[in-house]
Image (cartoon, helix red, strand yellow):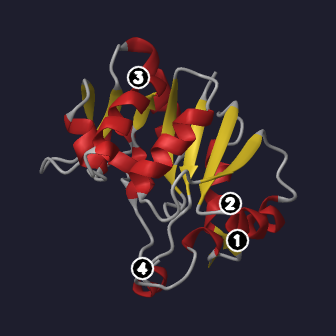
Amino acid sequence: MKSVIILCGGRSKRMGKDKGSLLLNDKPMVLHVLDAIKNIADEIILVLRDTEQIESYNTILNHRNMSLKAVADETKDGGPLIGILTGLSYINSDYAQILPCDSPFISKDFVVKMFELAKTDDFDAIVPVWNDGHIEPLHSLYKKSTIETIEKLISKEKRNVSSLIENLNAKYVPVEILDKTNMSFQNINTIKDFKDI
């Protein structure tokens, strides 16, 4: 089973808005991500901030014919590590691909390659890495068994996703192998990012 967790719980401090519901080419950004994983994922967990955000997203997701479950973060505004923990606790498979809802240019090829890598190696995480060593923890694939490590980090007040990866047996894969265009890793964080597209 191929599980995908989409993190959409955060509210952009720079935009002051819910990024997943922002329109890009007349379509909410979260739907761009969902379209990229259509016919690839068997199970989709959409992690949102709270029940109020779930209700607002029900309108957006109303016409999507996908096996999708919207869940609220275990801790409201707890950050992406809490979102990963929440999502992993709901999946029925051994691992899940994490995707942020503010990366509307994720390619199907990228997601397919990540799942192919998950079949061939026994790692806790598969992490895209840039030439300069910068990693993409919110475009990574994690085993469900990493829940225990996440809980330990949170108990020590460590909320950085990079801290999680440092504590895992991770396989680092160059981004150019996963997506030659690098577009899968482009985030929309500011109004200027919209204007630059």
- Tell me the amino acid under the disc marked 1: Lys
- Tell me the amino acid under the disc marked 3: Leu
Q: Locate residue 192, reporting x and y percent.
A: 41, 86
Q: Locate residue 61, reporting x and y percent.
A: 79, 59
Q: Residues within 10 Å of mark 1 (few under 14, many from 20)?
A: few
Q: Locate residue 57, reporting x and y percent.
A: 74, 65
Q: Nearer the viewer, residue 147 or 27?
A: 147
Residue 31's label in the rendered image is 2
Residue name at image x 70 percent, y 71 percent: 27
Q: Is residue 186 above or below residue 191?
A: above
Label pair 1/4, CB-CB below 8 angstroms: no
Label pair 3/2, CB-CB below 8 angstroms: no
Q: Quickly name the residue at label 4.
A: 193
Residue 60's label in the rendered image is none
Q: Quadrant of residue 13?
A: bottom left
Q: Residues within 10 Å of mark 3 (few under 14, many from 20)?
A: some
Q: Locate residue 88, reporting x and y percent.
A: 53, 35
Confirm whether residue 108 shows in the render. no
Q: Quickly name the residue at label 1.
A: 27
Residue name at image x 45 percent, y 50 percent: 82
Q: Earlier in the sequence, mark 3 or mark 2?
A: 2
Q: Quickly name the residue at label 3.
A: 117
Structural distance between the alpha carbons of marks 1 and 2: 7 Å
131 with respect to 45 (left or right): left
Looking at the rendered structure, the secondary structure element under dot 1 is strand
Label pair 4/3, CB-CB below 8 angstroms: no
Label pair 1/2, CB-CB below 8 angstroms: yes
